[in-house]
Amino acid sequence: MKKLIIGNWKLNPVTVREAVSLARKIDPKPKHEAVICPPAVFLASVQYPRVGAQDCFWENKGAHTGQVSPLALKSMKVKYCLVGHSERRNTGETEQSIKLKLESLLSVGIVPVLCVGHGTTVEQDDLEVTDVIKSQLQFALKGVDASRVVVAYEPVWAISSGNPYATKKTATPDHAEKISIFIRAKFKPMKVLYGGSANAANAHSYLSQPNIDGLLVGGASLLPKDFNAMINLSL
Ligand code: PGA
């Protein structure tokens, strides 16, 4: 079965030339469903069959200086958009704004990829972790048809860099699978992804878990050889 593998380029690269060139190196016809999420300013230039966005605003138009409209993203053929990434939560994103963004995305027909896991620590056991993500999911998905939403479980401590909680540890496939089972049973989303230091060497161990539908990949998505190997894995 096809998995969904989303490359989150974050704030990389820094020139349009590099962004176009990086996208050209990604296999356009991979075995799995692959999506690349370049910085929003490069969306118009980057050519790839499936592109996503890293964030958006909740209003489509009006006096909102510097914001990115969900409707504008839709017009750029954006299929998926991350919401609630821990790096956004670190800069003040609230549960309320995450919910508003998620609902706006659904209203224009973009699939929200709701990232949860912020507030978990490496010491917490599975039960405590489910408590944290349960409250994040309950808030964001209240009154929402969860079957239209992809959930990405990203333990903040497992994210490779760019956040103050990074520990250089990765979640075990067993832990990621257990949390996915919980999310699936309790919230019934479209898909559950795992994210946090996923790379070419460990991707198979996550993707071979029956309840992990794919990966949200940061650092390794900037390495074409590695990302191409991940999106073409035989399972
Ligand atoms: P990472 O990032 O793969 O570099 O850990 C994942 C993410 O932040 O989405």
Image (cartoon, rainbow, N blue to C red):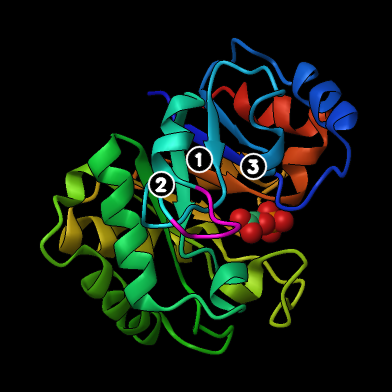
> Residues at badges 1 and 3 in contact (C-beta under 8 Å)?
no
Callout 2: few (<14), some (14-19), or many (20+) C-alpha neighbours within 10 Å? Answer: many
Residue 190: x percent and y percent? 26, 42
In the figure, 160 relative to 34: above or below?
below
The image quarter containing residue 182 is: bottom left
Q: Which amino acid does label 2 sit on?
A: Ile
Q: Mark 2 points at which residue?
A: 212
Closer to the observer: label 3 or label 2? 3
Residue 132, relative to residue 152: is it above or below? below
Confirm whether the magenta stretch covers residue 157.
Answer: no
Residues in magenta, as a range = 63-68
Label 1 vs 3, first from the N-terminus: 3
Quadrant of the picture in which ligand 1 is shown? bottom right
What residue occupies the far left of the structure in this picture? Answer: 143
Residue at the image point whose x is 76% and y is 68% from the top: 162
The amino acid type, in three-letter code, at marker 3 is Ala
**Residue at left 27%, top 62%?**
183
Helix, strand or loop for the magenta stretch, by majority: loop
Give the residue type that dot 1 points to: Leu
Q: Which residue lies furthest to the top in this view?
A: 29
User: Residue, x 71% and y 45% (percent of image)?
Assistant: 9
**Left or right of residue 182: residue 87:** right
Q: Report which residue position mark 3 lands on.
A: 40
Mark 3 crowdedness (10 Å alpha carbons): few <14, some 14-19, many ≥20:
some
Residue 147 location, quadrant: top left
Q: Residue 60 carries which label?
A: none
Given contact means CB atoms under 8 Å apart, are the residues at marks 2 and 1 in contact? Answer: yes
For marks 1 and 3, give the CA distance. Answer: 28 Å
- Is 8 placed above or below 16 here? below
Cβ–Cβ under 8 Å for marks 3 and 2: no
Q: Where in the figure is residue 114, as x and y percent of width and height?
A: 39, 57
